[in-house]
């Protein structure tokens, strides 16, 4: 007992803890590209503060599933997060939910960093955000803000250890180099774990992975009105056993986390993002410029299994050097807003956005000794090499304004114009094993261009019914850019087929309320959306290439509630729930040489309900030294969902239980945590041909966090 008390004294260091809060946090967000109170903006926004990020133990953006109503996110096996909000889901490398990190649009699934560390706040806007955010924000926007340096020296160091070989170490430091003039910030994470899956082919762990990431700031205050920030982010992922998939739902559940793949390799995945921000605060307007460069190089050191079985059937090769499979994106945004201190009833935001994309892809589908089992052809031991050079350019201008008619009524209106041009060049070559190079072209060198443009309007009405009660109604139009289909080995799938943009019309009404001196907060929203020219994905095998077609009309409707309460001192309750009914009103797709009518089927990756209840109690364990005990429990519920358009691959409703208990002092925190304590077995992601990836099993561990 004496030893335990001594340990508490060491952990507590010195000083006193902040008093247990008696009211909920007052949250300021930048969801509409300017600082505003969360409870006063006519948009469905979930704000996860720095404290909540730690409370929920969020290490990756996909873990905000159900923490945000009607949001579902999953890893298909290669660390790219596929995210759905309100039935609007990502079906290609162009996401349906846009992600911004520190003001920079993370252009595609390849280039954004999903690792979370040293987070100031995560804002999730639900529903189309086309006016301010443009392309690929049809489902919503995830806006991540990391902590930036200032005049005080502060930082943290954190260590995590757990089962399945989990180790995660994070550190951050922010400090002034020259007070009131120059600041520096550094943060980094090293993360590793053993594989959850076991490969019976070679009796080893599968999906063993580790990563190293960093986030670096240099901020210069030119004068009180101008400041410049340079930011660099990077992550190096290594995965021994990418795509832990099992063919068939029954097999996946009969022997959970067991697979049988003969082609095992390591994924090399390097992402590098830089940005330069220039900000001006003026009397007439505020101005900002955001310039960014993003790149990602991802390849497999050896051929990766393409049939997810022990046979020598199909493997995928993409290790062709630094010139290939390396996405590069340049973006530039200029933004003007009305001054923050203005007392005018007229508030406005306007700006422009530009991007340039270069994406050279070279990938071979290799057919081995057992290829006949896959292709029903006696031909074997050859490769079909597809080479694609894709370039893109886009330009947008936007504006949004709000006018307070009186103390109760405010009108909002906005519009955005997007123009995008895409160009692709493809070449398909045949190379038998043993040949020094390709011997003929099965797809001659071909090129195509396509351009798209769209107007995205928004109108809304905000009613301040009382000091702590706001009602709003909005109409907005969503837009997801069209594109060109890639090259596949299937001759029935023409390359460079242009598919059209996808559009949505969204109506939303909501209410934001606080009660009992900000001890209870209740936000409610109802939404209805129709999506035309729905972009429907079809996975072409054995190439593992997704072909997109405009094939239907989707209707999505539902409701959301967010509740936060402090009923008694030290007890905090958070509850979020979402209900979505997303159904194809018309849907006709090619199937087995004919056409299948899938009208009435449910949307992919869209649980009909998401629910998260979190209870946390904190009380004084010792007063001198000041030590508190924290106990937390979470209940997550996800409703029925489907993973293929025909709705054959179904996941029934399931629950996940999480908990955390620990001691907290002014300078340190020590926790024991567990996730999925009930060891629920469920499909996290599945491909339409039947390959299944289960969600993570029960995990537990310890966290020690020191701060100063």
Image: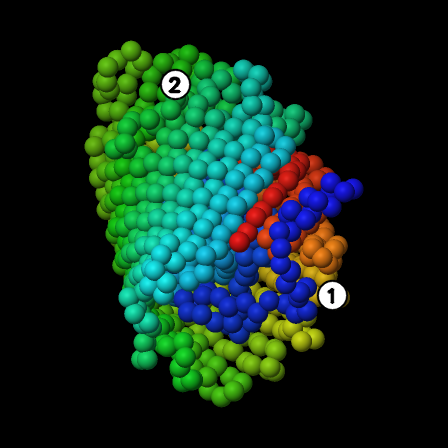
User: Is 173 placed left or right of 452 in the picture?
Assistant: right
Please tell me whether mark 1 sits on a helix, a strand or a loop.
Answer: loop
Q: Earlier in the sequence, mark 1 or mark 2?
A: 2
In percent of width and height, residue 247 lies at: 56, 27
Q: CA distance from mark 1 to mark 2?
A: 65 Å
Report x, y in % for residue 598.
Answer: 53, 45
Q: Splitting the image into 4 quarters, where does residue 327 fall?
A: top left
Whether residue 230 is visible: yes
Establish if 460 lies above or below 113.
Answer: below
**Taking 135 as reference, is 68 left or right?**
right
42 sits to left or right of 696: left
Label 2 CA crowd tier, 10 Å (few <14, some 14–19, many 20+): many
> Which dot, 1 or 2, sits closer to the camera?
1
The residue drawn where x is 73% and y is 42% is 4
Quadrant into which the N terminus falls:
top right
Give the image quarter of residue 336: bottom left
Q: Position of residue 479 (x, y in %)?
A: 39, 58
Work out whether residue 95 or residue 635 is closer to the camera in this orientation and state it. 635
Q: Answer left or right for 649 relative to 486.
A: right
Q: Secondary structure at mark 2?
A: strand
The residue depicted at 40 percent of the width and 52 percent of the height is: 185
Residue that numbered label 1 is attached to: 569
**639, 699: nearer the viewer:** 699
What residue lies at 57% left-to-right and 48% top-to-bottom? 706
Quarter of the figure with residue 429: top left
Considering depth in this image, is 306 or 236 the residue closer to the camera? Answer: 236
Q: Which residue is mark 2?
A: 367
* Disc assigned to residue 429: none
The answer to whether residue 61 is seen in the rendering is: no
């Amino acid at each position: 007992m004496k030893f335990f008390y001594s340990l508490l004294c060491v952990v507590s260091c010195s000083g006193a803890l902040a008093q247990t809060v008696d009211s909920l946090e007052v949250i300021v967000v930048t969801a509409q590209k300017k600082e505003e109170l969360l409870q006063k903006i006519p948009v469905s926004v979930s704000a996860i503060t720095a404290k909540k990020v730690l409370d929920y133990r969020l290490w990756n953006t996909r873990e905000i599933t159900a923490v945000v109503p009607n949001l579902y996110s999953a890893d298909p096996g290669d660390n790219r997060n596929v995210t759905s909000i309100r039935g609007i889901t990502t079906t290609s490398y162009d996401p349906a939910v846009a992600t911004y990190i520190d003001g920079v649009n993370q252009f595609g699934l390849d280039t954004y960093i999903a690792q979370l560390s040293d987070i100031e706040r995560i804002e999730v806007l639900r529903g189309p955000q086309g006016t301010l955010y443009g392309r690929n924000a049809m489902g919503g926007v995830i806006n991540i803000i990391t902590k930036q340096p200032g005049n005080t020296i502060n930082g943290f160091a954190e260590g995590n250890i757990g089962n399945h070989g989990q180790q995660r170490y994070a550190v951050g430091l922010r400090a002034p180099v020259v007070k009131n003039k120059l600041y520096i910030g550094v943060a980094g994470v090293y993360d590793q774990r053993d594989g959850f899956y076991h490969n019976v082919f070679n009796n080893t762990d599968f999906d063993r992975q580790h990563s190293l990431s960093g986030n670096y700031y240099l901020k210069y205050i030119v004068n009180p009105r101008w400041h410049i920030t340079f930011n660099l982010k990077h992550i190096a992922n290594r995965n021994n056993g990418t795509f832990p998939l099992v063919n068939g739902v029954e097999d996946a559940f009969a022997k959970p986390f067991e697979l049988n793949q003969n082609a095992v390799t390591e994924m090399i995945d390097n992402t590098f993002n830089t940005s330069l921000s220039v900000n001006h605060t003026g009397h007439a307007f505020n101005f900002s410029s955001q310039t960014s460069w993003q790149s990602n190089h991802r390849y497999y050191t050896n051929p990766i299994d393409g049939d997810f079985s022990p046979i020598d059937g199909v493997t995928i090769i993409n290790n062709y050097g630094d010139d290939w499979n390396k996405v590069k994106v340049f973006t530039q945004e200029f933004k003007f807003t009305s001054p923050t201190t203005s007392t005018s009833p007229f508030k406005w935001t306007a700006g422009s956005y530009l991007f340039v994309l270069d994406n050279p892809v070279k990938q071979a589908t290799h057919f081995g000794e057992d290829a006949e089992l896959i292709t029903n052809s006696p031909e074997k031991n050859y490769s079909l090499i597809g080479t694609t050079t894709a370039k893109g350019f886009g330009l947008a201008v936007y504006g949004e304004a709000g006018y307070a008619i009186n103390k109760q009524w405010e009108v909002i209106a906005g519009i955005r114009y997007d123009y995008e041009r895409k160009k692709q060049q493809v070449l398909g070559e045949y190379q038998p094993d043993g040949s020094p190079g390709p011997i003929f072209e099965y797809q001659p060198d071909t090129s195509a261009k396509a351009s798209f443009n769209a107007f995205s309007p928004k109108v809304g009405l905000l009613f301040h019914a009382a000091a702590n009660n706001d009602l709003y109604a909005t109409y907005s139009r969503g837009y997801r850019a069209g594109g060109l289909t890639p090259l596949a080995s299937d001759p029935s799938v023409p390359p460079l087929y242009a598919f059209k943009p996808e559009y949505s019309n969204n109506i939303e009404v909501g209410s934001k309320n606080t009660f009992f001196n900000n001890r209870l907060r209740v936000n409610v929203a109802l939404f209805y959306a129709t999506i035309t020219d729905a972009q429907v994905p079809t996975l072409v095998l054995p190439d593992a290439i997704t072909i997109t077609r405009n094939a239907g009309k989707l209707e999505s409707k539902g409701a959301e509630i967010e509740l936060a309460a402090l009923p008694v001192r030290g007890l905090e309750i958070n509850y979020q729930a979402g209900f979505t009914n997303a159904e194809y009103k018309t849907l006709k797709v090619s199937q087995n040489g004919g056409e299948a009518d899938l009208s009435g089927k449910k949307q992919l990756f869209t649980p009909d309900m998401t629910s998260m209840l979190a209870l946390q109690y904190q009380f004084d364990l010792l007063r001198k030294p000041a030590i508190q005990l924290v106990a937390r429990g979470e209940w997550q519920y996800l409703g029925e969902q489907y993973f293929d358009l025909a709705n054959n691959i179904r996941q029934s409703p399931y629950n996940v239980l999480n908990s955390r208990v620990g001691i907290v002092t002014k300078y340190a925190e020590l926790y024991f945590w567990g996730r999925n304590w009930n060891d629920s077995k469920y499909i996290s992601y599945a491909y339409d041909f039947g390959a299944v990836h289960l969600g993570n099993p029960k995990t537990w561990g310890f966290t020690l966090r020191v701060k100063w």
